[in-house]
Structures are given as C-alpha cells and as structure tokens.
Image (spheres, grey):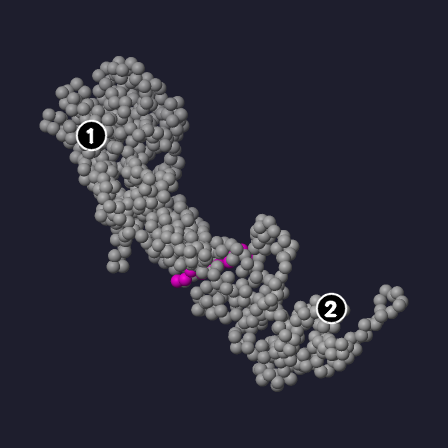
C-alpha cells in the first residue's frame, strides 16, 4: 500500500523522503519546497500548501490518494521493516506437491505405528515424514484442496509405539519449518489451513462425507469404513472459516470432539447431521471418537457410521431454511439443459406467426403479446412489494420449487419428474442463495405435489418476449438486455418505414415513420434530418413547401418554353462523305433559367429561400450512403449498439460505410442469386403510374412526360429519344399530326 501511495505521489511530481516528508521542486528556482507529510500510522497524507493539485490542502486519506485502487490494510507502518514485510507478502509462494515430496520422506512415527496395526495400509492421504531438524521423523499431514492443489502440511510429533501425540512439542507447518524452507530456498511464508485435510478425496465419487477435528482420527476411521470419505478440519475452531461449496450437494455428517457446541450450530445452519454420541457424562471433554475404539461406546459409534455408509440414518424432517453467508446477485434458474425436459410452451397465434418475430441478441420479441408457461424460475429473484425490494422467504422458495415441479409434470406427461427433481434441488443448493434440507422436499412435499390434481393455470403468463441467451446472470442484466433488444426491434420497424420514403423525393417528417419526437430515437431522427438537409436541401417542412413552389414554377416555365417557343425541330444532317466527324447545327433554342428576382416576383417566395434553392447542390452519394445504412441495419439489426444516454436508451452506429458495404456484398453473394436471375421475368405494368391517358400525362411535368412517351412508344430510335427528351410535348404534337393525316 505504501509503495502505491509513493508511486502515486511521485507520478504527480512530488518527492517522498524516507521519513515521510513530501517535497516538490519550484518551477522557477528548481529548489525543493516542503509540501506535506506522509502519515502511514494514520493512513493519510497532510499537505501544508494549497497548490498541490490534484490533491487538496490539509488531510488526504489514502483512499483520496488512490481512488478506486485503494484496498484497506490496517497494518501499514512506514519504515524499512514495513517495506520488507510488504515485499515479502507480495511474494507469497504457492507450493507444489512435487516440492512436498522432494523435501520430505515416506517414513514417519505415525505410519510406523499404523503399519503395525495394518501392514497393507494404503497411504491415500499422502502423509510423509520430516527428514531433518528437531522434528525429524515427525508426521506431515498434507492439506490438498478439492482441485488437487497442495497448499501446505501440518507437522505433528507422534510416538511410534503408542500412536499418541507428543503434546510437549508444538505443531509446525511445511511453510514455516526452517529445514524445509531452507531446502526450497524461500523465506518463511504466512499461510492458513484454508481447506480440509483429505478434501481432494471428495472429488470423483458420491460417498457420504464425515468431518472430524483431528487428521489422525480421519486416517484411522478411513481404515475401517471404505464407503465413507473422512475429512478433518484441523482444529475445533477451524470448521466455521473453511470454504464448503464443494459439499453443497453432498451428504455431510459431523463428529465433533466432546464439548464442542459450535459444531452443532454450524450443522443446523448447513443442514448437516451432527452426532451426539460423545455428548454423554462418561466421555471426557475434548476426546474424539478415535479415543474410544476399544471402549463399549464404540459399538454405538460403529453402528451409526454403518448407517451413514448405507445411507439409512434418519435425518431431520424439517425444511431447515436459511440464507448463505454470501448472497450473490445473479440468476439461479431451476432448469438446466442437462435435464433434457420440455420446460417452455407458448400459445399458437396465426396472426402473430404471420408477421413473425424479431430475433434479438438475447431475446425473441413478438409483434404482440402471447400466453406462455415455463418451468424455469429464478429462485434468487427479489420481489417488489409496495415499491420495496423484498428478499425471498422460505415460503417464496417453496412456491417457486412447486411451480417448477408442476409445470414440468404438465409439459412432460410421459416422464417421471420425481426422478429428475433431485438434480434440480442440487442445482438450486449449489447456485442459489439458500441452504435447506432437500430430503424434506423429496420425501414429503414432492409426494403431495405428484399425487394431487395438477392445476397450472396460475403459472400461465402473458408476455411479448422469449429468452434466447443463457448468459444473463442477474435481474439487472435481464432488464438491460431485454430493453436493448426492444430498442433494436423498434429501430428495425422505423427503418422499414423509412426505406420506401427515401424514394419519394419529398420532405420526410418524424411522424411519417411513427416518431413523436427526436428523443424517442435519435439515430433514425438523424437519418431523416440528413436526408432532408443533404438530399433535398430543406431543414423544415415550411422551407420545403416554399422551395416546392420555386420548383413547380421553373418546371412550368420550362414546359411553356419548350411547347410554345421552340417551333422548329432539331435537324439531323446526313452526308455521303466519310469524315471523322460531321457538323451538326442545333437550331432549337435552349431553355434558360429565369433570374432569381423574376422567380421571387412570380412565386412570392422569400429571396433567401430562392437563393438557397438556386445555390443548393446535393452532397455527393448522400442518398446512396443513407440507403446503405438503412439496408444494412434492416438486414443486421443486432449490430446496432444501444447505449443509455441520459434517461433514454438510444441506438448508435459504430460501423463505417466501407464495413457495411463489404458485409452487404458478402451477404448478397451468399444468397446465391445473380441480378439476371433476380430480374429476368415478365413484368406486369397494369398498375403502373405510366399506364394513363395522353391527356392526363400532358398535365404532368416534362420528366414524367418523357417517361410516359418511352413507355407507350417503345419502338422509337435512340435519336428520337434525344428529341423527346428535349421537347416531349412537341414530339407528341408531331405524332398526333401524323396520325390525323393518316
């Protein structure tokens, strides 16, 4: 911690002396000026001056200095010894089983005693002996965790003849015994017996587990009962602090030394059986069951352990509900995929199926609500009662487990749910926030649930979503992902509305796609704004309407000029001479744009707007780029990044146009259809906008009229098409004359 404080101060331009005084060089004179004092005993830094940015004048706690990197340590003392201790703690070594074997020997006093009693004894606990020093031939009891990692070993001196412990010699440890750490070339370590002795023997079997206090007792009992795994806590007071997650789904039995009341409290809380055989006046306080191997009381001990081995011992018939010490804020579903059962069903709706569903990142969102039933329940979920978050109670947990059982039974009529339910209870015990007696449910409650009328109507829900992802850890993530997928779905629908509007060449208002205001969906609103401003050159609907007047006036002037003033046709000059070029003189006047003042006068549109109209040039590829963005996110809506901005969720584009075009190209290629295949089919023009009478067509603008002529006179030549483009009305008048003469 001190090192971090000094590093932080140094990075800000300060110099910290060995006595804790803090200096800073003057920017003018470059001389050191005393600025403050590092007080390690008080966990703070005191600055005398005010110009000590980024810190403040006066007292700054270590938390103020380090911010989020601060970790509380009550034992900080400034000085060489503290620095040395801090350095040593930072170099804590994890020993290996190979190091344990290398620095010890097989022979020891306790195994010598055991071999006399049982010559063919197998050393399943891997106990060994000390090679040298004042504890030579003492016994090492290795503490190997559930994952088979060697942590340390306890060293105890025994008499090789009687097997009794030599209480005149204190216990030592592998990580502190000088001859061992000297051989390993390391300093003395600080470690705790964090796991159980024999913990590694629990893995890969389903045997009942018996926990005793002494390592010696566990070894002796394991020689007698093969069908039980015996563990040792290493001390009467060490049981409470050990991690026991690996025992959650196991049958556990406690055999405390006589007079140790705390084990009864722990057993009741964790739903572990606690033997009371030693709680009699004839047993000396502090004795354990191994002390009575040749005593009449052993018959009771042996009978009880045999019942444990055969799983016939009677245990509590109560639910024994309690909360785990560490409450985790994450989902605990009652269903796992390994069950292979049907646990979800939704009502069929032809109208909903017709429109399909939106497949989001984590949820499938429907266009309308539907009825469904599910056996999957989050047992860790908090309820909200009168606006307050309420922790699930014993009754709540039982109701949720009953919910799961009844729905599974309904959806799986050919399955015996009773045979699967123990797996569900084990899963809940392992991942839930509760401790309870699963046997009470399996032997009492489940019989009631299985034999009455299985009514599940109260479990039918109405919703518009179905969960797709198994990576949602808690209620916060659930709501977060659900509403983000909803926003993607809403954006998808808005883009589908916007796509055809871009082809209408008119001003688009937010209401045209169903938006009430810009804040509802800033992403789509900005697309609309970009189209209006860069493609149409209009920032408001009123601005568009005024410019529309200018456009209509100019089209009228152009049509009038072409119709009434251009009486001569273009002449095509032919020649017999083969020249590299021929002179072609156009005798048809070209349309000239009216003066802006004239347009203002005739349209009554403000000069500023007229000037904007004449000066506006659409941005290159603006419309094409907008179409690319819309096409991409209609095809790939889940690529939209949804973020919370202020109080609202907003979709956000994080991709470049190049990336979008590349992806669309690959997706279109993978579709396996060419442009020729896509468009090579007979067209039906019955309902075409061009399929109207000539009189009606002549009332339209020149652009429409040109298209109408090409549609109705497909046999005209390329040269004639140029003539039509220049003067569509004149062409029609000429055609009509020919028809009249004919």
Tell me what residue is drawn at x 57 percent, y 54 percent.
Answer: 664
The magenta stretch is: 647-656
Which residue is found at the position 40% from the left and 28% from the top?
185
Q: Quadrant of residue 186?
A: top left
On-image quarter of the N terminus: top left
Q: Quadrant of the C terminus?
A: bottom right
- In the foreground, 206 or 730: 730
Asked if the stretch drawn in magenta spans residue 93, the answer is no
Q: Residue 539, relative to residue 224: is it above or below?
A: below
On the image, the x and y values in percent for residue 205 come to 32, 29
Q: Residue furthest right?
A: 577
User: Which residue, as the protein is rendered here, is positioned at the far left?
Assistant: 281
**Image spot of residue 448 (x, y percent):** 22, 42
Q: Secondary structure at mark 2?
A: loop
Q: Which residue is mark 2?
A: 716
Q: Nearer the viewer, residue 91 or 24?
A: 91
Residue 728 visible to the viewer = yes
Which residue is disc 1 drawn over?
Answer: 313
> Was residue 651 drawn as part of the magenta stretch in this picture?
yes
The image's mark for residue 635 is none
Residue 539: image x %, image y %?
Answer: 53, 73
């Amino acid at each position: 911690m001190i090192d971090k404080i000094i590093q932080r101060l140094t990075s800000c331009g300060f110099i910290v002396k060995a006595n804790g005084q803090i200096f800073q060089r003057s920017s003018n004179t470059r001389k050191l000026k005393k600025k403050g004092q590092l007080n390690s005993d008080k966990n703070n830094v005191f600055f005398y001056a005010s110009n000590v940015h980024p810190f403040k004048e006066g007292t700054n706690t270590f938390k103020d200095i380090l911010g989020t990197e601060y970790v509380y340590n009550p034992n900080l003392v400034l000085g060489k010894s503290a620095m040395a201790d801090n350095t040593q703690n930072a170099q804590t070594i994890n020993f290996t089983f190979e190091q344990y074997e290398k620095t010890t020997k097989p022979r020891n006093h306790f195994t010598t005693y055991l071999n006399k009693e049982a010559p063919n004894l197998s050393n399943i606990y891997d106990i060994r002996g000390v090679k040298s020093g004042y504890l030579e031939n003492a016994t090492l009891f290795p503490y190997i965790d559930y994952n088979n990692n060697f942590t340390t070993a306890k060293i105890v001196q025994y008499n090789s003849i009687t097997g009794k412990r030599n209480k005149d010699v204190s216990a030592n440890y592998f990580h502190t015994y000088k001859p061992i750490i000297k051989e390993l070339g390391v300093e003395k370590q600080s470690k705790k017996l964090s796991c159980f002795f024999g913990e590694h023997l629990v893995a890969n079997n389903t045997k009942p587990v018996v926990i005793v206090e002494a390592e010696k007792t566990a070894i002796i009992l394991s020689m007698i009962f093969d069908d039980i795994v015996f563990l040792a806590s290493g001390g009467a007071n060490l049981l409470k602090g050990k991690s026991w997650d690996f025992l959650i789904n196991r049958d556990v039995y406690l055999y405390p030394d006589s007079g140790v009341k705390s084990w009864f409290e722990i057993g009741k809380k964790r739903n572990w059986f606690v033997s009371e055989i030693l709680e009699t006046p004839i047993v000396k306080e502090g004795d354990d069951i191994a002390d009575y191997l040749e005593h009449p009381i052993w018959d009771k001990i042996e009978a009880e352990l045999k019942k444990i081995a055969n799983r016939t011992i009677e245990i509590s018939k109560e639910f024994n509900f309690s909360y785990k010490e560490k409450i985790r804020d994450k989902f605990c579903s009652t269903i796992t995929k390994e069950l292979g059962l049907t646990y979800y069903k939704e009502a069929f709706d032809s109208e909903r199926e017709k429109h399909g569903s939106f497949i989001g990142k984590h949820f499938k969102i429907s266009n309308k609500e539907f009825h469904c039933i599910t056996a999957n329940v989050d047992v860790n979920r908090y309820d909200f009662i009168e606006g307050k978050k309420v922790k699930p109670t014993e009754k709540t947990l039982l109701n949720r487990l009953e919910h799961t059982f009844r729905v599974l039974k309904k959806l799986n009529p050919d399955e015996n749910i009773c045979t699967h339910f123990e797996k569900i209870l084990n899963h809940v015990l392992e991942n839930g926030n509760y401790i309870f007696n699963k046997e009470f449910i399996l032997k009492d409650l489940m019989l009631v649930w299985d034999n009455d009328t299985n009514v599940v109507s109260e479990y039918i829900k109405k919703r518009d979503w179905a969960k797709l992802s198994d990576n949602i850890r808690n209620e916060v993530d659930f709501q977060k992902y659900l509403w983000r997928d909803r926003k993607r779905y809403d954006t998808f629908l808005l883009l589908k509305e916007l796509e055809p509007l871009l082809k209408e060449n008119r001003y688009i208002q937010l209401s045209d796609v169903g938006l009430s205001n810009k804040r509802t969906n800033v992403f789509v609103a900005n697309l609309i704004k970009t189209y209006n401003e860069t493609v149409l050159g209009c920032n408001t609907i009123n601005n568009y309407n005024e410019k529309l007047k200018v456009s209509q006036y100019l089209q009228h002037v152009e049509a009038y000029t072409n119709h009434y003033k251009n009486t001569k046709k273009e002449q095509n000059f032919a020649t017999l001479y083969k020249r590299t070029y021929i002179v072609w003189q156009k005798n048809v006047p070209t349309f000239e744009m009216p003066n802006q003042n004239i347009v203002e006068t005739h349209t009554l549109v403000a000069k500023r707007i007229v000037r904007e109209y004449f000066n506006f040039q659409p941005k290159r590829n603006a419309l094409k780029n907008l179409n690319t963005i819309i096409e991409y996110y209609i095809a790939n809506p889940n690529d939209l990044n949804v973020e919370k901005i202020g109080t609202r969720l907003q979709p956000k584009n994080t991709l470049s146009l190049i990336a979008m075009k590349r992806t669309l190209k690959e997706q279109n290629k993978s579709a396996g259809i060419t442009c020729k295949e896509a468009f090579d089919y007979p067209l039906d023009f019955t309902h075409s906008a061009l399929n109207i009478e000539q009189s009606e067509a002549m009332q339209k603008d020149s652009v429409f009229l040109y298209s109408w002529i090409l549609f109705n006179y497909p046999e005209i030549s390329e040269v004639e098409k140029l003539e039509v483009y220049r003067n569509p009305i004149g062409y029609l008048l000429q055609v009509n004359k020919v028809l009249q003469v004919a």
